[in-house]
Structures are given as C-alpha cells and as structure tokens.
Image: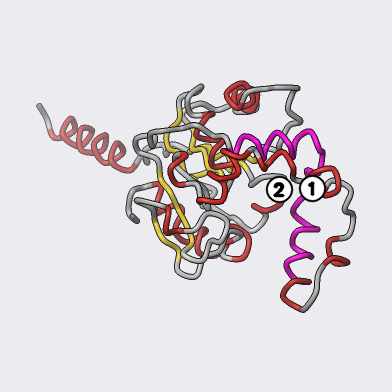
C-alpha cells in the first residue's frame, strides 16, 4: 500500500467522523383538562430540534359512549406512533386509555391520577351515591361571563382564567366527562407512567398520590401558571434525568 492510499483512507476516516448522526425527533401530543381548551398549552415550549408539539381538542361524546371507545376516537388524531402522550387532569386519564390502543414512547400525566385509588374521598362518595348526576351542568354550560360570579381580586383572576381556557361547555360533554372521572375503574397503575403533581393541588390532593414528581407550590392549574417549570424540566423528564 503506498502513501497515497494511506492518505485516502485517512481522509475517508476523517469525513466519516465529521458527518453528524441524524437526530430522532419525538412527537408530543398534549390533551387538556376537563372542558379546557388547547390554549392552556400556549406557554409550553420544547426544543424544536428534538420535539414537535401537537395538541388534541375534546370531541363531543356519542350517547352512552364508553371512555375506551372515546379514547380510540382521540387516537384517530394521532398521526405519529411511538409518540409521547401528555394529559392534564382528566386529560391524564384519557391519555392512559389512549395508550392501551396505540404504541407510545412515554405517558406523562399532570395534575391527574394514575388509578381509581388516587381519587379523593369526595369523588368516591359521589360514585357510591351517584351524586354526580345532580350537578347542574346545564347551568354551567350557559354561563357566558364567569367574572360576574366572582368576588374579590383573587376570585376575579381565577374567573378570568376560566373564561379564557374553559371552552368546552356542551352539556353532553360535561355530563359524560364528570361521570367518567367519578366512575373511572382503573385498578392498577400503568407501568412506566410519569406523574407530575403539585403539592397545592386541591382537586386531586397530593395526600392521595403515590410515586410522582412533586412541583413545589404547584396547583391544579400549574400547566398555565408554572409553564416555565415545565419548559425547563419536561426535556429532562423525557430523558429520565429528573424523577
């Protein structure tokens, strides 16, 4: 072998080293909380070279539709398999049901529950007594200005948030969603699920939650008012660097 041959081999070797490996992009699908609009994710930003964000809006349920069949319909909007599913509150329950229908890379739930045992006592009582059927969802669906019902600065701020983000007011959806939260029958936690929960969550109190990533002073609506925390930590969580 002559020197010229050695130079070519060395050159080829150098070229091979310099060619960057193509980076796999992960598709991330977000499902909002009960009655919430996808705009609750407006402040969520992930590195564009690694993640592509998609949002899934609520559908009007069919009459007597099971949560399993509803989840299958939601899966019809998921165009990329082996994706990351993220659900907030009731959306967290839905993405768990969706994961039973399609292949996913990761399941992340925020301000939600992993099984029926993590539901608070008041919801368990509502299930036994069927009190959830008495909720005035017809009245709620007709409210056009939440601020008129609010008293005090804090209440008005929260009312403004509800006005902005709670867009699904259809009585059929509200009745169906409330029933399926209260009557969700999942016994066991899905293996490998990632649960992020605020220690100030009053909807699903953290006292009932096991094995989760705790957000200090995080409330049930922290996906909106703690977006910076999620922007900083979600990529770490996806890669298993935060637990």
Q: Which residue is mark 1?
A: 167
Cβ atoms at labels 1 and 2 below 8 Å apart: yes
At 28% from the left and 41% from the top, the residue drawn is 17
Residue 36 - label: 2
Magenta: predominant secondary structure element? helix
Q: Which residues are magenta?
A: 157-182
| Disc with the residue nearer the chain's start (1 vs 2) | 2
- Tell me, yes or no, whether the highlighted magenta stretch contains residue 48: no
At 50% from the left and 64% from the top, the residue drawn is 229
Q: Is residue 167 left or right of residue 6?
A: right
Q: Is residue 242 left or right of residue 100?
A: left
Q: Nearer the viewer, residue 241 or 132?
A: 132
Q: Is residue 75 above or below residue 204?
A: above
* Mark 2 nearby-residue class (10 Å; few <14, some 14–19, many ≥20): many
- Tell me, yes or no, whether the highlighted magenta stretch contains residue 171: yes
Q: Nearer the viewer, residue 220 or 243?
A: 220
């Amino acid at each position: 072998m002559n020197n010229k041959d050695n130079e070519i081999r060395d050159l080829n070797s150098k070229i091979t080293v310099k060619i960057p490996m193509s980076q796999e992009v992960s598709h991330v699908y977000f499902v909002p909380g009960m009655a919430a609009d996808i705009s609750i994710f407006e402040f969520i930003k992930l590195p564009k070279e690694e993640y592509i964000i998609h949002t899934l809006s609520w559908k009007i349920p069919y009459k007597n539709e099971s949560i399993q069949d509803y989840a299958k319909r939601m899966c019809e909007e998921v165009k990329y398999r082996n994706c990351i599913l993220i659900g907030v509150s009731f959306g967290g329950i839905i993405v768990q049901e969706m994961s039973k229908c399609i292949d996913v890379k990761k399941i992340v739930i925020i301000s939600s529950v992993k099984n029926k045992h993590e539901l608070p006592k008041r919801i368990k009582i509502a299930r036994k007594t069927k009190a959830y059927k008495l909720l005035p969802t017809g009245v709620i669906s007709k409210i056009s200005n939440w601020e008129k019902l609010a008293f005090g600065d804090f209440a008005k701020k929260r009312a403004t948030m509800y006005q902005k983000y709670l867009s699904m007011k259809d009585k059929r959806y509200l009745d169906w969603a409330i029933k399926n939260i209260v009557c969700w029958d999942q016994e066991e936690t899905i293996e490998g699920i990632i649960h992020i929960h605020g220690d100030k969550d009053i909807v699903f109190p953290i006292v009932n939650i096991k094995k989760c990533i705790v957000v200090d002073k995080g409330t049930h609506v922290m996906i909106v008012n703690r977006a910076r925390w999620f922007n900083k930590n979600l990529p770490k969580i996806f890669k298993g660097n935060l637990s």
